[in-house]
């Protein structure tokens, strides 16, 4: 079907920006060109087929443009990423044998953006130079590079070169989307921001350090195990060794995640258990003790993230009949939004993860206020529960 060759995005002659099919007039009135070959495009917005852009050909000659669709998706993604003022960096996960370690994700505030393909800065020029698709800078001069993959992944050679630059590089893998088609700027941005399955670190400045620590931990554990075996054999030379040596149990306890079953990467927390009940137990264990707030027909818990004050976990629990937790949840989202905090669903019912500067302090004030506000209602509801 012709649809599969159609472009989801095009370059607007009027604005010089990427647009999607929903943003333009039908036909040649869209005033767009192909980001790959520069030819005029027409917007096909009929009733039968999925709306798309196609190369405009006068007469009957067929358009020959290879990679127009690929370039259009690539350009749209770059355009979206370059406009971000904030990006949620995913967790870094490093594995060595059966061991794994992770660094939690974090919020990166963008103050400046570069598109090296459209600039002539010497850093990104010359033979063998890596030109990332988008370069993001924060206020401290720290950089994150972004690579958009449509059909070609960052290959080994490029990965080696990236190490030479020493800048953490995120890859957004759109190869699955490329096959699907039917994207708009809004749906593409949502996927780029929220779909953890398409983002991965192709290089991270802390990767080598974490890998080295894991290696040392593995070697130390192996050595300890050998020592324990030697000791056991020396003490009981005639007993068969049929249970795991003691050292293994100690190691398991130290690792903390080993008894949590299957793990999944969480953008903020790093590796967490996949099983929701184990996940809750893991959070109970790794987060410091919570602060409690008594609200009308509910109780709220506020916890610090073990990695710092800029991330908190808020949980609402029902008390008595007629749960109001969803109401509180909505108030929390509203407050977080007005206070410039990011508030996201955490994978556990009634729980939200809130992130931002002075997060704990602001949330404490909010929940204390909510407690005072619903205090009288709380007393009433307590009475009604008791009777
Ligand atoms: Zn083209």
Image (cartoon, helix red, strand yellow):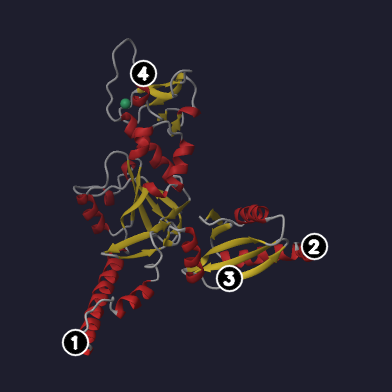
- What is the spatial separation of the Cα atoms under label 3 and label 1, in whole angstroms? 50 Å
Which numbered dot is residue 384?
A: 2
Q: In terms of depth relative to the viewer, which is nearer, 237 or 301?
A: 237
- What is the spatial separation of the Cα atoms under label 1 and label 2, in whole angstroms? 70 Å
Are discs 4 and 1 less than 8 Å apart at CB? no
Counting residues from the start of the chain, the first of labels 2 and 4 encountered is 4
Q: Nearer the viewer, mark 1 or mark 2?
A: 1
Residue at image coords 26%, 72%:
218
Residue sticking out furthest to the bottom: 235
Residue at image coords 48%, 71%:
285
Q: In terms of depth relative to the viewer, which is nearer, 106 or 224?
A: 224
User: In the figure, is residue 166 to the left or right of 272?
Assistant: left
User: In the figure, is residue 331 to the left or right of 179?
Assistant: right
- Judge the density around disc 1: few (<14), some (14-19), many (≥20) Cα neighbours within 10 Å: few
Above or below: residue 333 compared with residue 366: above
Q: Nearer the viewer, mark 3 or mark 2?
A: 2
Q: In terms of depth relative to the viewer, which is nearer, 122 or 211?
A: 211
Counting residues from the start of the chain, the first of labels 3 and 4 encountered is 4
- What is the spatial separation of the Cα atoms under label 3 and label 4, in whole angstroms? 63 Å
Q: Nearer the viewer, mark 2 or mark 4?
A: 2
Are discs 3 and 2 less than 8 Å apart at CB? no
Q: Secondary structure at mark 4?
A: loop
Kindly identify which residue carries mark 1.
237
Counting residues from the start of the chain, the first of labels 1 and 2 encountered is 1
Kindly identify which residue carries mark 3.
290
- What is the spatial separation of the Cα atoms under label 3 and label 2, in whole angstroms? 27 Å
Counting residues from the start of the chain, the first of labels 4 and 1 encountered is 4
Quadrant where the N terminus is found in the figure? top left
Task: Residue 94: give x, y in percent of width and height.
Answer: 31, 62
């Amino acid at each position: 079907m012709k649809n599969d060759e159609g472009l989801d995005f095009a370059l607007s002659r009027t604005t010089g920006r990427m647009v999607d099919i929903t943003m333009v007039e039908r036909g040649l009135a869209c005033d767009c060109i192909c980001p790959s070959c520069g030819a005029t495009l027409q917007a096909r917005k009929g009733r039968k087929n999925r709306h798309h852009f196609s190369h405009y050909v006068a007469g009957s000659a067929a358009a020959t443009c290879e990679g127009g669709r690929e370039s259009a998706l690539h350009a749209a993604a770059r355009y979206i990423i370059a406009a971000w003022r904030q990006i949620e960096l995913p967790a870094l996960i490093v594995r060595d044998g059966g061991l794994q370690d992770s660094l939690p994700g974090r919020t990166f505030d963008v103050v400046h953006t570069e598109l090296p393909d459209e600039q002539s800065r010497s850093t990104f020029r010359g033979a063998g130079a890596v030109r990332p698709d988008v370069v993001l800078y924060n206020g401290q001069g720290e950089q994150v590079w972004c690579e958009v993959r449509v059909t070609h992944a960052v290959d080994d050679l490029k990965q080696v070169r990236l190490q030479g630059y020493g800048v953490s590089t995120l890859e957004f893998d759109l190869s699955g989307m490329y096959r699907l088609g039917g994207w708009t700027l809004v749906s593409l941005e949502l996927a780029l921001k929220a779909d953890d399955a398409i983002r991965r670190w192709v290089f991270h400045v802390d990767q080598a350090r974490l890998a080295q620590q894991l290696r040392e931990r593995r070697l130390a554990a192996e050595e300890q195990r050998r020592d324990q075996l030697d000791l056991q054999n020396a003490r009981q030379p005639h007993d068969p060794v049929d249970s795991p040596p003691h050292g293994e149990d100690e190691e398991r306890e130290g690792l903390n995640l080993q008894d949590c079953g299957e793990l999944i990467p969480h953008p903020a927390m790093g590796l967490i258990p996949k099983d929701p009940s184990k996940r809750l137990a893991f959070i109970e264990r790794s987060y410091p003790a919570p602060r409690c707030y008594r609200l009308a027909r509910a109780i709220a818990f506020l916890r610090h993230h073990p990695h710092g004050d800029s991330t908190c976990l808020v949980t609402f629990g029902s008390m008595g009949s007629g749960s109001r937790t969803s109401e509180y949840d909505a108030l929390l989202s509203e407050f977080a939004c007005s206070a410039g905090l990011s508030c996201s669903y955490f994978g556990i019912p009634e729980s939200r993860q809130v992130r931002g500067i002075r997060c704990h302090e602001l949330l404490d004030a909010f929940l204390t206020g909510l407690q005072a506000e619903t205090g009288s209602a709380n007393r009433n509801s307590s009475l009604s529960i008791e009777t």
